[in-house]
Image (cartoon, grey):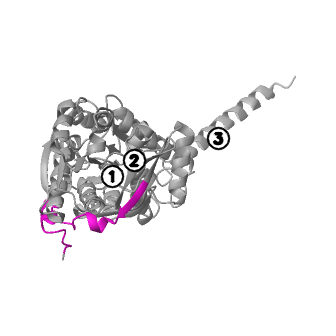
Protein backbone atom coordinates (compact mmCIF):
# COMPACT_ATOMS: atom_id res chain seq x y z
CA UNK A 1 0.00 0.00 0.00
CA UNK A 2 1.26 3.54 -0.88
CA UNK A 3 1.42 5.39 2.44
CA UNK A 4 2.33 8.66 0.69
CA UNK A 5 -1.02 8.95 -1.09
CA UNK A 6 -3.10 10.39 1.78
CA UNK A 7 -0.35 12.88 2.52
CA UNK A 8 -0.26 13.90 -1.18
CA UNK A 9 -4.04 14.18 -1.28
CA UNK A 10 -3.89 16.37 1.80
CA UNK A 11 -1.33 18.59 0.09
CA UNK A 12 -3.41 18.99 -3.03
CA UNK A 13 -6.64 19.53 -1.04
CA UNK A 14 -4.96 22.31 0.92
CA UNK A 15 -3.59 23.80 -2.31
CA UNK A 16 -7.05 23.76 -3.93
CA UNK A 17 -8.55 25.41 -0.87
CA UNK A 18 -5.90 28.14 -0.91
CA UNK A 19 -6.39 28.73 -4.64
CA UNK A 20 -10.18 28.73 -4.23
CA UNK A 21 -9.90 31.23 -1.40
CA UNK A 22 -7.59 33.42 -3.43
CA UNK A 23 -9.88 33.24 -6.45
CA UNK A 24 -12.84 34.10 -4.27
CA UNK A 25 -10.98 37.09 -2.85
CA UNK A 26 -10.14 38.32 -6.36
CA UNK A 27 -13.75 37.84 -7.48
CA UNK A 28 -15.06 39.68 -4.43
CA UNK A 29 -12.59 42.50 -5.02
CA UNK A 30 -13.72 42.72 -8.65
CA UNK A 31 -17.36 43.01 -7.58
CA UNK A 32 -18.67 46.51 -6.94
CA UNK A 33 -20.22 47.18 -3.56
CA UNK A 34 -23.96 47.68 -4.00
CA UNK A 35 -25.53 51.13 -3.93
CA UNK A 36 -28.34 51.18 -1.37
CA UNK A 37 -31.19 53.56 -2.19
CA UNK A 38 -33.86 54.48 0.34
CA UNK A 39 -37.05 54.77 -1.75
CA UNK A 40 -39.94 56.63 -0.09
CA UNK A 41 -43.49 56.45 -1.43
CA UNK A 42 -47.01 55.87 -0.10
CA UNK A 43 -47.42 52.15 0.58
CA UNK A 44 -50.58 52.46 2.71
CA UNK A 45 -53.56 54.78 2.98
CA UNK A 46 -55.67 56.54 0.35
CA UNK A 47 -52.65 57.70 -1.68
CA UNK A 48 -51.09 54.25 -2.01
CA UNK A 49 -53.23 52.70 -4.75
CA UNK A 50 -53.36 55.62 -7.19
CA UNK A 51 -49.89 57.02 -6.49
CA UNK A 52 -47.56 55.23 -4.11
CA UNK A 53 -47.79 51.70 -5.45
CA UNK A 54 -47.33 52.71 -9.12
CA UNK A 55 -44.24 54.67 -8.04
CA UNK A 56 -42.89 51.62 -6.20
CA UNK A 57 -43.63 49.44 -9.22
CA UNK A 58 -41.83 51.87 -11.50
CA UNK A 59 -38.77 51.76 -9.26
CA UNK A 60 -38.73 47.96 -9.23
CA UNK A 61 -39.06 47.72 -13.03
CA UNK A 62 -36.22 50.17 -13.65
CA UNK A 63 -33.82 48.83 -11.02
CA UNK A 64 -34.35 45.18 -11.93
CA UNK A 65 -33.62 45.88 -15.61
CA UNK A 66 -30.77 48.21 -14.73
CA UNK A 67 -29.03 45.59 -12.59
CA UNK A 68 -29.40 43.06 -15.40
CA UNK A 69 -28.09 45.47 -18.03
CA UNK A 70 -31.38 45.26 -19.94
CA UNK A 71 -32.33 48.94 -20.21
CA UNK A 72 -32.43 50.56 -23.66
CA UNK A 73 -29.76 53.06 -24.70
CA UNK A 74 -28.34 55.26 -23.31
CA UNK A 75 -28.65 53.21 -20.11
CA UNK A 76 -27.20 49.85 -21.17
CA UNK A 77 -24.46 49.70 -18.50
CA UNK A 78 -25.35 47.46 -15.55
CA UNK A 79 -26.44 49.09 -12.30
CA UNK A 80 -24.81 52.41 -11.50
CA UNK A 81 -21.54 52.24 -13.41
CA UNK A 82 -21.40 48.50 -12.73
CA UNK A 83 -22.46 48.69 -9.08
CA UNK A 84 -25.72 46.81 -8.34
CA UNK A 85 -28.57 48.81 -6.82
CA UNK A 86 -30.54 47.73 -3.76
CA UNK A 87 -33.88 49.37 -2.95
CA UNK A 88 -35.08 49.85 0.63
CA UNK A 89 -38.70 51.01 0.57
CA UNK A 90 -40.23 53.23 3.26
CA UNK A 91 -43.91 54.13 3.60
CA UNK A 92 -44.62 57.86 3.16
CA UNK A 93 -47.92 57.64 5.04
CA UNK A 94 -48.15 59.15 8.50
CA UNK A 95 -47.47 62.86 8.18
CA UNK A 96 -44.47 65.17 8.19
CA UNK A 97 -43.18 64.43 11.71
CA UNK A 98 -43.07 60.72 10.95
CA UNK A 99 -41.33 61.34 7.61
CA UNK A 100 -38.62 63.45 9.26
CA UNK A 101 -37.94 60.58 11.66
CA UNK A 102 -38.04 58.00 8.88
CA UNK A 103 -35.57 60.03 6.79
CA UNK A 104 -33.16 60.17 9.72
CA UNK A 105 -33.53 56.40 10.17
CA UNK A 106 -32.75 55.75 6.51
CA UNK A 107 -29.58 57.85 6.70
CA UNK A 108 -28.31 57.21 10.24
CA UNK A 109 -29.57 53.70 11.00
CA UNK A 110 -29.90 52.02 7.61
CA UNK A 111 -26.86 53.76 6.08
CA UNK A 112 -28.39 54.24 2.64
CA UNK A 113 -26.19 55.81 -0.01
CA UNK A 114 -28.98 58.12 -1.16
CA UNK A 115 -32.71 58.74 -0.80
CA UNK A 116 -35.21 58.98 -3.68
CA UNK A 117 -38.78 59.77 -2.79
CA UNK A 118 -41.73 61.86 -1.67
CA UNK A 119 -45.06 62.58 -3.29
CA UNK A 120 -46.53 65.05 -0.80
CA UNK A 121 -45.29 68.64 -0.99
CA UNK A 122 -45.72 68.90 2.77
CA UNK A 123 -43.34 66.00 3.29
CA UNK A 124 -40.85 67.51 0.85
CA UNK A 125 -40.83 70.85 2.65
CA UNK A 126 -40.23 69.07 5.97
CA UNK A 127 -37.49 66.77 4.68
CA UNK A 128 -35.63 69.21 2.40
CA UNK A 129 -33.43 70.84 5.10
CA UNK A 130 -32.36 67.41 6.39
CA UNK A 131 -30.55 66.56 3.15
CA UNK A 132 -27.93 69.23 3.77
CA UNK A 133 -27.97 68.75 7.55
CA UNK A 134 -27.13 65.04 7.22
CA UNK A 135 -25.12 65.52 4.00
CA UNK A 136 -26.96 62.84 2.06
CA UNK A 137 -27.79 62.93 -1.65
CA UNK A 138 -31.58 63.16 -1.85
CA UNK A 139 -33.78 63.27 -4.95
CA UNK A 140 -37.43 64.33 -4.84
CA UNK A 141 -39.26 62.53 -7.64
CA UNK A 142 -42.75 64.05 -7.54
CA UNK A 143 -43.80 66.73 -5.03
CA UNK A 144 -44.54 69.98 -6.84
CA UNK A 145 -44.40 73.02 -4.57
CA UNK A 146 -42.07 75.58 -6.18
CA UNK A 147 -40.99 76.79 -2.74
CA UNK A 148 -38.39 74.02 -2.36
CA UNK A 149 -35.80 75.79 -4.50
CA UNK A 150 -37.36 79.25 -4.80
CA UNK A 151 -37.16 79.90 -1.06
CA UNK A 152 -33.91 78.05 -0.30
CA UNK A 153 -30.71 76.68 -1.78
CA UNK A 154 -29.34 73.17 -1.20
CA UNK A 155 -26.22 71.21 -2.07
CA UNK A 156 -27.41 67.64 -1.48
CA UNK A 157 -31.01 67.98 -2.69
CA UNK A 158 -32.34 67.63 -6.26
CA UNK A 159 -35.79 67.34 -7.81
CA UNK A 160 -36.15 65.61 -11.19
CA UNK A 161 -39.79 66.58 -11.78
CA UNK A 162 -41.23 69.99 -12.65
CA UNK A 163 -43.03 72.25 -10.18
CA UNK A 164 -46.73 73.02 -9.77
CA UNK A 165 -46.21 76.32 -11.58
CA UNK A 166 -45.82 74.43 -14.85
CA UNK A 167 -49.10 72.59 -14.25
CA UNK A 168 -51.17 75.63 -13.32
CA UNK A 169 -49.83 78.00 -15.97
CA UNK A 170 -50.34 75.39 -18.69
CA UNK A 171 -53.86 74.72 -17.35
CA UNK A 172 -54.71 78.43 -17.54
CA UNK A 173 -53.37 78.65 -21.10
CA UNK A 174 -55.37 75.58 -22.06
CA UNK A 175 -58.76 76.64 -20.67
CA UNK A 176 -58.54 80.24 -21.91
CA UNK A 177 -57.99 78.89 -25.42
CA UNK A 178 -60.64 76.19 -24.99
CA UNK A 179 -63.25 78.60 -23.59
CA UNK A 180 -62.41 82.12 -24.83
CA UNK A 181 -65.72 83.53 -23.57
CA UNK A 182 -65.55 82.12 -20.03
CA UNK A 183 -66.81 84.47 -17.34
CA UNK A 184 -66.23 82.62 -14.06
CA UNK A 185 -63.79 80.08 -12.73
CA UNK A 186 -63.55 78.33 -9.37
CA UNK A 187 -61.24 75.96 -7.57
CA UNK A 188 -61.20 73.00 -5.23
CA UNK A 189 -57.72 72.20 -3.92
CA UNK A 190 -56.26 70.51 -0.85
CA UNK A 191 -55.47 72.88 2.00
CA UNK A 192 -51.69 72.44 2.20
CA UNK A 193 -48.66 73.62 0.23
CA UNK A 194 -49.38 71.75 -3.02
CA UNK A 195 -53.02 72.77 -3.22
CA UNK A 196 -52.38 76.34 -2.12
CA UNK A 197 -49.49 76.86 -4.55
CA UNK A 198 -51.44 75.27 -7.41
CA UNK A 199 -54.48 77.48 -6.90
CA UNK A 200 -52.44 80.65 -6.35
CA UNK A 201 -50.53 80.11 -9.60
CA UNK A 202 -53.67 79.24 -11.57
CA UNK A 203 -55.57 82.26 -10.27
CA UNK A 204 -52.61 84.58 -10.92
CA UNK A 205 -52.22 83.21 -14.47
CA UNK A 206 -55.94 83.68 -15.14
CA UNK A 207 -55.74 87.30 -14.00
CA UNK A 208 -53.00 87.88 -16.57
CA UNK A 209 -54.69 85.97 -19.39
CA UNK A 210 -58.29 86.99 -18.63
CA UNK A 211 -58.16 90.08 -16.39
CA UNK A 212 -61.92 90.63 -16.44
CA UNK A 213 -62.89 87.10 -15.46
CA UNK A 214 -64.21 86.50 -11.93
CA UNK A 215 -62.91 83.90 -9.47
CA UNK A 216 -66.22 82.63 -8.09
CA UNK A 217 -65.01 80.49 -5.16
CA UNK A 218 -61.94 78.71 -3.86
CA UNK A 219 -62.67 75.57 -1.85
CA UNK A 220 -59.80 74.31 0.31
CA UNK A 221 -60.74 71.04 2.08
CA UNK A 222 -58.29 69.10 4.21
CA UNK A 223 -55.81 66.80 2.46
CA UNK A 224 -57.27 63.28 1.98
CA UNK A 225 -60.59 64.34 3.53
CA UNK A 226 -62.39 61.90 1.21
CA UNK A 227 -65.87 63.45 1.45
CA UNK A 228 -66.60 66.60 -0.57
CA UNK A 229 -70.37 67.01 -0.56
CA UNK A 230 -70.37 70.54 0.87
CA UNK A 231 -67.61 71.72 -1.48
CA UNK A 232 -69.34 70.23 -4.52
CA UNK A 233 -72.58 72.00 -3.57
CA UNK A 234 -70.74 75.32 -3.35
CA UNK A 235 -69.11 74.75 -6.73
CA UNK A 236 -72.47 73.90 -8.31
CA UNK A 237 -74.09 77.08 -7.01
CA UNK A 238 -71.13 79.19 -8.18
CA UNK A 239 -72.06 78.53 -11.83
CA UNK A 240 -68.38 78.58 -12.76
CA UNK A 241 -67.49 77.85 -16.38
CA UNK A 242 -64.24 76.21 -15.26
CA UNK A 243 -63.29 74.42 -12.04
CA UNK A 244 -59.58 74.01 -11.34
CA UNK A 245 -58.40 71.18 -9.10
CA UNK A 246 -54.98 69.84 -8.21
CA UNK A 247 -56.51 66.93 -6.29
CA UNK A 248 -54.42 63.77 -6.56
CA UNK A 249 -54.63 60.18 -5.37
CA UNK A 250 -57.79 59.08 -3.60
CA UNK A 251 -59.04 62.67 -3.43
CA UNK A 252 -59.07 62.97 -7.24
CA UNK A 253 -61.00 59.72 -7.53
CA UNK A 254 -63.45 60.78 -4.80
CA UNK A 255 -64.13 64.09 -6.55
CA UNK A 256 -65.04 62.25 -9.74
CA UNK A 257 -67.15 59.59 -8.04
CA UNK A 258 -69.00 62.14 -5.88
CA UNK A 259 -69.13 65.06 -8.31
CA UNK A 260 -70.15 63.31 -11.53
CA UNK A 261 -73.52 61.98 -10.28
CA UNK A 262 -74.40 65.47 -9.03
CA UNK A 263 -73.66 67.06 -12.41
CA UNK A 264 -70.50 68.98 -11.52
CA UNK A 265 -68.62 67.73 -14.56
CA UNK A 266 -71.57 68.51 -16.84
CA UNK A 267 -72.18 72.03 -15.54
CA UNK A 268 -68.52 73.06 -15.45
CA UNK A 269 -65.37 72.13 -17.32
CA UNK A 270 -63.28 70.52 -14.61
CA UNK A 271 -59.52 70.84 -15.07
CA UNK A 272 -57.59 68.15 -13.17
CA UNK A 273 -53.92 69.10 -13.25
CA UNK A 274 -52.91 65.78 -11.64
CA UNK A 275 -55.81 63.75 -13.02
CA UNK A 276 -54.06 61.26 -15.30
CA UNK A 277 -53.94 58.37 -12.75
CA UNK A 278 -57.76 58.43 -12.69
CA UNK A 279 -57.73 57.39 -16.37
CA UNK A 280 -55.80 54.25 -15.42
CA UNK A 281 -57.87 53.37 -12.35
CA UNK A 282 -61.39 54.65 -13.17
CA UNK A 283 -61.38 54.36 -16.95
CA UNK A 284 -64.75 55.20 -18.48
CA UNK A 285 -65.99 56.55 -15.13
CA UNK A 286 -63.99 59.71 -15.87
CA UNK A 287 -66.64 62.06 -17.31
CA UNK A 288 -66.46 63.15 -20.94
CA UNK A 289 -65.09 66.65 -21.27
CA UNK A 290 -62.78 66.52 -18.22
CA UNK A 291 -59.51 68.31 -18.90
CA UNK A 292 -56.66 66.05 -17.77
CA UNK A 293 -53.01 66.70 -17.03
CA UNK A 294 -50.22 64.29 -16.06
CA UNK A 295 -47.76 66.68 -14.38
CA UNK A 296 -45.53 66.40 -17.42
CA UNK A 297 -45.23 64.42 -20.66
CA UNK A 298 -46.20 61.07 -19.17
CA UNK A 299 -48.46 58.11 -19.99
CA UNK A 300 -50.85 59.23 -22.78
CA UNK A 301 -48.72 62.34 -23.35
CA UNK A 302 -45.34 60.57 -23.46
CA UNK A 303 -43.21 60.64 -26.63
CA UNK A 304 -42.89 57.62 -28.90
CA UNK A 305 -39.32 56.68 -28.02
CA UNK A 306 -37.57 53.35 -27.54
CA UNK A 307 -37.19 54.04 -23.82
CA UNK A 308 -40.89 54.87 -23.39
CA UNK A 309 -42.01 51.84 -25.43
CA UNK A 310 -39.78 49.57 -23.36
CA UNK A 311 -40.98 51.04 -20.06
CA UNK A 312 -44.68 50.76 -20.90
CA UNK A 313 -44.35 47.18 -22.14
CA UNK A 314 -42.22 46.05 -19.19
CA UNK A 315 -44.61 47.65 -16.71
CA UNK A 316 -47.78 46.33 -18.35
CA UNK A 317 -46.32 42.83 -18.74
CA UNK A 318 -45.49 42.76 -15.02
CA UNK A 319 -48.51 44.49 -13.48
CA UNK A 320 -51.28 44.16 -16.07
CA UNK A 321 -51.93 47.92 -16.36
CA UNK A 322 -50.20 50.80 -18.09
CA UNK A 323 -47.89 52.93 -15.92
CA UNK A 324 -49.44 56.15 -14.63
CA UNK A 325 -47.39 59.27 -14.13
CA UNK A 326 -46.13 58.43 -10.59
CA UNK A 327 -44.40 55.39 -12.13
CA UNK A 328 -42.94 57.55 -14.88
CA UNK A 329 -41.65 60.14 -12.43
CA UNK A 330 -40.02 57.57 -10.16
CA UNK A 331 -38.36 55.98 -13.19
CA UNK A 332 -37.23 59.44 -14.30
CA UNK A 333 -35.60 60.12 -10.92
CA UNK A 334 -33.67 56.84 -10.93
CA UNK A 335 -32.47 57.41 -14.49
CA UNK A 336 -31.38 60.91 -13.52
CA UNK A 337 -29.28 59.42 -10.73
CA UNK A 338 -27.83 56.85 -13.13
CA UNK A 339 -26.91 59.58 -15.62
CA UNK A 340 -25.23 61.72 -12.95
CA UNK A 341 -23.43 58.76 -11.36
CA UNK A 342 -22.00 57.49 -14.64
CA UNK A 343 -21.04 60.98 -15.79
CA UNK A 344 -19.14 61.43 -12.52
CA UNK A 345 -17.57 57.98 -12.82
CA UNK A 346 -16.35 58.69 -16.37
CA UNK A 347 -14.72 61.91 -15.12
CA UNK A 348 -13.13 59.89 -12.27
CA UNK A 349 -11.16 57.58 -14.62
CA UNK A 350 -13.81 54.89 -14.36
CA UNK A 351 -13.54 54.59 -10.59
CA UNK A 352 -16.55 54.70 -8.28
CA UNK A 353 -17.40 58.39 -7.78
CA UNK A 354 -17.72 60.13 -4.43
CA UNK A 355 -20.98 61.69 -3.34
CA UNK A 356 -19.58 65.15 -4.06
CA UNK A 357 -18.60 64.07 -7.57
CA UNK A 358 -22.11 62.74 -8.24
CA UNK A 359 -23.61 66.00 -6.97
CA UNK A 360 -21.34 68.06 -9.23
CA UNK A 361 -22.32 65.89 -12.22
CA UNK A 362 -26.03 66.17 -11.37
CA UNK A 363 -26.04 69.98 -11.40
CA UNK A 364 -27.31 71.36 -14.75
CA UNK A 365 -27.53 67.80 -16.11
CA UNK A 366 -29.58 66.94 -19.21
CA UNK A 367 -30.82 63.36 -19.44
CA UNK A 368 -33.49 61.22 -21.09
CA UNK A 369 -36.45 59.74 -19.27
CA UNK A 370 -39.42 57.73 -20.57
CA UNK A 371 -41.24 61.08 -20.77
CA UNK A 372 -38.49 62.66 -22.87
CA UNK A 373 -35.69 65.10 -22.17
CA UNK A 374 -35.20 66.50 -18.67
CA UNK A 375 -33.17 69.65 -17.99
CA UNK A 376 -31.85 70.34 -14.49
CA UNK A 377 -31.98 74.04 -15.31
CA UNK A 378 -33.52 75.73 -12.27
CA UNK A 379 -32.54 76.04 -8.61
CA UNK A 380 -28.86 76.48 -9.53
CA UNK A 381 -29.02 73.20 -11.43
CA UNK A 382 -30.92 71.24 -8.78
CA UNK A 383 -34.50 71.62 -10.10
CA UNK A 384 -35.81 70.00 -13.27
CA UNK A 385 -37.50 71.88 -16.07
CA UNK A 386 -39.84 69.95 -18.36
CA UNK A 387 -42.77 70.60 -20.67
CA UNK A 388 -46.27 69.29 -20.19
CA UNK A 389 -49.55 68.61 -21.99
CA UNK A 390 -53.31 68.71 -21.47
CA UNK A 391 -56.15 66.95 -23.23
CA UNK A 392 -59.85 66.25 -22.93
CA UNK A 393 -61.17 62.86 -21.81
CA UNK A 394 -63.54 61.23 -24.29
CA UNK A 395 -65.37 57.93 -23.85
CA UNK A 396 -65.11 55.96 -27.10
CA UNK A 397 -66.93 52.63 -26.92
CA UNK A 398 -66.26 52.17 -23.22
CA UNK A 399 -62.60 53.16 -23.54
CA UNK A 400 -61.22 56.52 -22.48
CA UNK A 401 -59.19 58.38 -25.07
CA UNK A 402 -57.67 61.86 -25.07
CA UNK A 403 -58.66 64.46 -27.65
CA UNK A 404 -57.64 68.07 -28.30
CA UNK A 405 -54.20 67.40 -26.82
CA UNK A 406 -51.94 70.43 -26.60
CA UNK A 407 -48.31 70.42 -25.50
CA UNK A 408 -46.47 73.26 -23.80
CA UNK A 409 -42.68 73.58 -23.90
CA UNK A 410 -40.96 74.07 -20.56
CA UNK A 411 -39.83 77.61 -21.41
CA UNK A 412 -43.45 78.71 -21.91
CA UNK A 413 -44.78 77.45 -18.57
CA UNK A 414 -41.77 77.81 -16.28
CA UNK A 415 -40.07 80.90 -14.84
CA UNK A 416 -36.38 81.52 -15.60
CA UNK A 417 -33.83 80.38 -13.04
CA UNK A 418 -33.67 82.74 -10.08
CA UNK A 419 -37.15 84.22 -10.66
CA UNK A 420 -39.96 83.27 -8.29
CA UNK A 421 -43.07 81.78 -9.83
CA UNK A 422 -45.52 84.35 -8.49
CA UNK A 423 -43.36 87.25 -9.67
CA UNK A 424 -42.93 85.71 -13.12
CA UNK A 425 -46.67 85.13 -13.56
CA UNK A 426 -47.59 88.64 -12.41
CA UNK A 427 -45.03 90.08 -14.86
CA UNK A 428 -46.98 88.52 -17.71
CA UNK A 429 -44.67 85.49 -18.07
CA UNK A 430 -41.71 87.60 -19.12
CA UNK A 431 -38.53 85.74 -19.96
CA UNK A 432 -35.40 86.42 -17.96
CA UNK A 433 -32.63 88.68 -19.19
Q: Is residue 10 above or below residue 247?
A: above
The circle drawn on residue 295 is 1
| Residue 176 among those drawn in magenta | no
Q: Where's the C terminus, which quadrant?
A: bottom left
Q: In this view, does 414 lie to the left or right of 318?
A: left
Find numbered disc 2 in the image and state the secondary structure of the residue it sits on.
helix
The answer to which of marks 2 and 1 sits earlier in the sequence is 1
- Where are the magenta residues, as a range? 403-432
Find numbered disc 3 in the image and state the secondary structure of the residue it sits on.
helix
Residue at position x 29%, y 68% in the image: 411
Q: How far apart are marks 3 and 2 (CA)?
A: 52 Å
The answer to which of marks 3 and 2 sits earlier in the sequence is 3
Marks 2 & 1, CB-CB < 8 Å contact: yes
Q: How far apart are marks 3 and 1 (CA)?
A: 57 Å
> Residue at label 2?
325
Quadrant in the picture for residue 204: bottom left
| Front: mark 3 or 2 | 2
Across and down, in percent, residue 121 comes to 23, 44
Q: Is residue 158 above or below residue 287?
A: below
The circle drawn on residue 19 is 3
Residue at position x 22%, y 51% in the image: 241
Q: Where's the N terminus, which quadrant?
A: top right
Amino acid sequence: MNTKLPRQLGFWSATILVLASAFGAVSAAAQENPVKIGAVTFLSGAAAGPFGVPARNGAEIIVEAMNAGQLPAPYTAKGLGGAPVQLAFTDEAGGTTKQVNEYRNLVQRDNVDMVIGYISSGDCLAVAPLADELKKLTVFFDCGTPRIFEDASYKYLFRTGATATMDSVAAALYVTELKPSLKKYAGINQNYSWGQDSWNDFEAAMKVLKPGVEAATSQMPKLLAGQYGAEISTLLTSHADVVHTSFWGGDAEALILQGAPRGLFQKSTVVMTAGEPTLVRLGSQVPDGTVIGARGPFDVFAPDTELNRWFRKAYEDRYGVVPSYPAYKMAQAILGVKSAWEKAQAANDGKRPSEDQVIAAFEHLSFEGPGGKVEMALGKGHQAMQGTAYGIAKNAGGKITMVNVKTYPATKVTPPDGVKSDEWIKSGFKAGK
